[in-house]
Amino acid sequence: MSNPLKVALIGANGQLGSDIVSHFAQGDRYQLTALTRTDIDICDANAVDRVLSGRKFDVVINSAAYVRVDDCEQEVERAFNVNAIGALNVARASRDIGALCVYVSTDYVFHGDRQVPYTESDLPDPINVYGTSKLTGEYLVKQTTLRSLILRISSVFGKAGASGKGGNFVETIIKKAKAGDSLKVVDDMFMSPTYTYDVARLLDELLQAGTTGIMHGANAGICSWHELATEILRLANIDHPIESIPTSAFPTKAKRPMNSALVSDRLNPSAAFKMRSWQDALTAYLSEKSYL
Ligand SMILES: NC(=O)c1ccc[n+]([C@@H]2O[C@H](COP(=O)([O-])OP(=O)(O)OC[C@H]3O[C@@H](n4cnc5c(N)ncnc54)[C@H](OP(=O)(O)O)[C@@H]3O)[C@@H](O)[C@H]2O)c1
């Protein structure tokens, strides 16, 4: 049996980070050091060096980000500090200790003006500050270290809820429906809803296989936000109407891609591990949260 991989996880109390912590604790493949913002501020290069240098990590996972997409439009400096300069600081420190640098990125690096899901070989072309800051982070990671894995994920829901967003879409829909609030959800914007626990399982597979480069890690399938909301209430057995509206009727500070669905050209379809459908992932999430 091989030695466990020594992994440093930054952003450990985030929505994805929490699921990486719980999944990587299973079995003996990993020895995980979970780091929150109080342990390490990735915007502070000296602090990043202080925490990582001299430690024998095989892998450093950077799941930290400034994820408030609308606020990023005003707080451009903060978005670039965390999502780009922070990524650079982590990549540099990872390189210096000989560790693989994993940078978690986003479907929002894409423009969204096409009808089919984006693969790893499609050219990014972000349309908002958040997406641009994350793409800059990707470039800085690639330029800094030869050993990186850039894992793009999409429209995530996880049991912890995004700490930066104060929850997730699934919880918001259930809460509003139970409160009897009117629900209006866009039906012309498409994506691949993704359960963060499945991203953690995928990351486990990728690390065990020694995968590097860019990977897309979304649950299988594509739907509109209205379809997702409808499926949430159907599965949770909540009878409440959801009005379909066009994106033009729901203006936001940040433009969002009309289609940001992701698919992977690189995941071997015959491999034992596959990303399940978003419907199966949603069912698992709702069951684990005791909604079913
Ligand atoms: N949420 C989505 O729908 C989505 C979609 C696609 C891609 N992603 C990507 O997935 C990753 C994880 O997102 P998430 O949903 O798990 O977000 P999240 O819950 O907001 O977690 C982000 C984490 O980053 C930490 N953080 C923020 N600024 C930091 C800093 N300067 N130094 C150190 N840590 C810092 C936060 O700590 P505090 O809680 O203390 O602030 C939090 O633990 C991110 O890279 C994001 O860009 C997310």
Image (cartoon, rainbow, N blue to C red):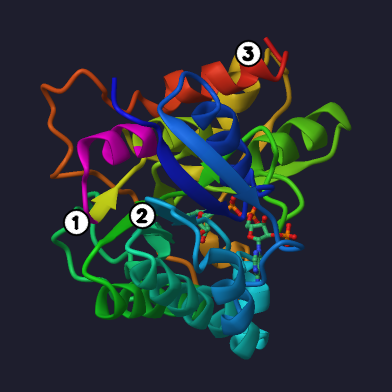
Verify CB contact (< 8 Å) between mark 1 and mark 2: yes
Q: Amino acid at mark 2?
A: Arg
Q: Contact (CB < 8 A) between labels 3 and 2?
A: no
Q: CA distance from mark 1 to mark 2?
A: 9 Å
The image shows residue 41, relative to residue 223, as above or below, that is below
The magenta region covers 203-213
Q: Secondary structure at mark 1?
A: loop
Q: Residue furthest right?
A: 179
Establish if 152 lies above or below 264: below
Query: Is 63 positioned to the left or the right of 218 in the image?
Result: right
Residue type for callout 3: Ser
Q: Is mark 2 within 8 Å of ligand 1?
A: yes
Disc number lying in front (3 or 2): 2
User: Element at badge 3?
Assistant: helix
Among the two numbered marks 1 and 3 on one chain, the one whose residue lies closer to the N terminus = 1
Disc 1 residue type?
Glu
Q: Badge 1 is on which residue?
A: 120
Main secondary structure along the magenta-highlighted residues: helix
Q: Position of residue 59 (x, y in %)?
A: 39, 51
The residues tagged by marks 3 and 2 sit, at their Cα atoms, a distance apart of 26 Å
- The residue lying at 41 percent from left, 64 percent from top is 108
**Residue at left offset 12%, top offset 32%:** 268
Q: Is residue 146 left or right of residue 37?
A: left
Q: Residue at x 69, y 56 (%)?
A: 36
Circle 2 is placed at which residue position? Answer: 152
Most extreme residue toward the bottom is 77
The answer to whether marks 1 and 3 mark residues whose Cβ atoms lie closer than 8 Å is: no
Mark found first going from the N terminus, 1 or 2? 1
Q: Residue 123: image x %, image y %?
A: 19, 70
Q: Which residue is mark 3?
A: 287
